[in-house]
Image (tube, rainbow, N blue to C red):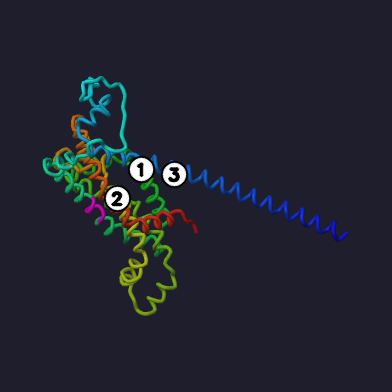
């Protein structure tokens, strides 16, 4: 009987070990599939950036050879051969910086539009700090009549695309004589509701006991806001600013609708003005436009992740 029970125990142990190994093998396969899938998605997302960087280092003749089917009407290459297809290279055959030299040294309109983008972005962010931070603090920390209804209106406005509000914005700006002026872009964006929604979550998470302790020590509401609210809510403020930079640095629709003078256009409207014969210049401009946004994203990535997580948390 003892030997029989030992054999049964050994069989059970072997079965458990086998099932455990099979489970680990399945988990390993699932992880490999997931890693492969995510890597493929990452490559798809990064490809346009690599495409632009490679194209910016190619000469115009090489670009015509590769993209002649879409760049020229006669689909001819520099060698005189007819091209009916598009091809690409991972690395340029003859790397050159001529496109960057042309943009940075021979295109003064590039710098005019660059500084217009800087003015718009900085102006919008400054306005959102002055307006959005106190609004988010008020919604998060105080109770007043109609608070929930007003916050629902804020959220509804946040979900509306620009096309829905374009006509009303145009009429208001026309009455205020702000059409064809940078302030016509800055002021509506400064009152955007999305930063309020982001910062609201961070301010709401501040313990009420901390504020009560400050009140007992004689601190007023303004001092509490400056000494407690802003420092503890700074991750939300920074995440809102990072999102604002990424959005307003690449602003297209509002300048197209409200700005008629070309000297007021931001950098996002410079690319459409480049003709097909200057493809290398277009690639170089794309890379240069991308650099500030990438730097801001890398610097504020941690705060941006906190902001995204906070908007998804429901208490």
Give yes or no for contact between labels 3 and 1 (Cβ–Cβ under 8 Å).
no
Taking 106 as reference, is 203 left or right? right
Residue toward you, 27 or 292 = 27
Residue 141 position by quadrant: bottom left
Badge 3 crowding class, 10 Å Cα cut-off, few under 14, some 14 to 19, many 20 or more, is: few
Going from the N terminus, do you reach mark 3 or mark 1 first?
A: 3
> Which residue appears at 15% of the width and 45% of the height?
111
Residue wearing tag 3: 39
- The verdict on residue 99 being magenta is no
Residue 175 visible in the displayed image: yes
Residue wearing tag 2: 294
Cα distance in 3D space between marks 2 and 1: 12 Å
Going from the N terminus, do you reach mark 2 or mark 1 first?
A: 1
> Disc 2 vs disc 3: which is toward the camera?
3
Mark identifier at residue 46: 1
Residue 256 visible in the displayed image: no
- Segment colored magenta: 121-125
Residue toward you, 232 or 53 = 53
Residue furthest toward the bottom? 217
Q: Position of residue 300 (x, y in %)?
A: 33, 57
Going from the N terminus, do you reach mark 2 or mark 3 first?
A: 3
Dot 3 falls on a residue whose secondary structure is: helix
């Amino acid at each position: 009987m003892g030997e029989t029970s030992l054999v049964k125990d050994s069989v059970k142990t072997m079965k458990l070990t086998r099932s455990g190994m099979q489970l680990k093998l399945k988990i390993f396969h699932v992880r490999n599939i997931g890693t492969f899938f995510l890597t493929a998605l990452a490559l798809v997302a990064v490809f346009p950036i690599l495409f632009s960087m490679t194209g910016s280092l190619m000469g115009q003749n090489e670009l015509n050879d590769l993209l002649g089917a879409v760049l020229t009407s006669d689909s001819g290459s520099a060698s005189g051969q007819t091209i009916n297809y598009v091809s690409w290279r991972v690395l340029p055959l003859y790397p050159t910086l001529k496109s960057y030299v042309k943009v940075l040294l021979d295109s003064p309109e590039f710098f005019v539009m660059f500084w217009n983008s800087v003015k718009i972005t900085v102006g919008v962010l400054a306005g959102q700090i002055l307006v959005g931070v106190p609004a988010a603090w008020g919604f998060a920390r105080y109770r007043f009549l109609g608070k929930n209804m007003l916050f629902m209106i804020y959220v509804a406005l946040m979900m509306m695309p620009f096309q829905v509000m374009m006509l009303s914005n145009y009429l208001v700006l026309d009455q205020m004589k702000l059409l064809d002026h940078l302030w016509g872009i800055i002021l509506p964006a400064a009152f955007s509701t999305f930063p309020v929604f982001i910062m609201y979550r961070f301010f709401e998470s501040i313990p009420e006991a901390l504020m009560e302790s400050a009140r007992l020590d004689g601190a007023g509401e303004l001092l509490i806001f400056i000494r407690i609210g802003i420092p503890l809510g700074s991750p939300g403020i920074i995440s809102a600013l990072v999102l604002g930079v990424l959005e307003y640095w690449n602003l297209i629709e509002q300048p197209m609708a409200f700005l008629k003078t070309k000297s007021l256009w931001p950098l996002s409207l410079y690319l459409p003005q480049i003709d097909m014969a200057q493809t290398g210049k277009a690639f170089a401009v794309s890379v240069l436009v991308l650099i500030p946004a990438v730097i801001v994203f890398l610097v504020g990535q941690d705060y941006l992740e906190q902001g995204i997580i906070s908007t998804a948390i429901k208490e």
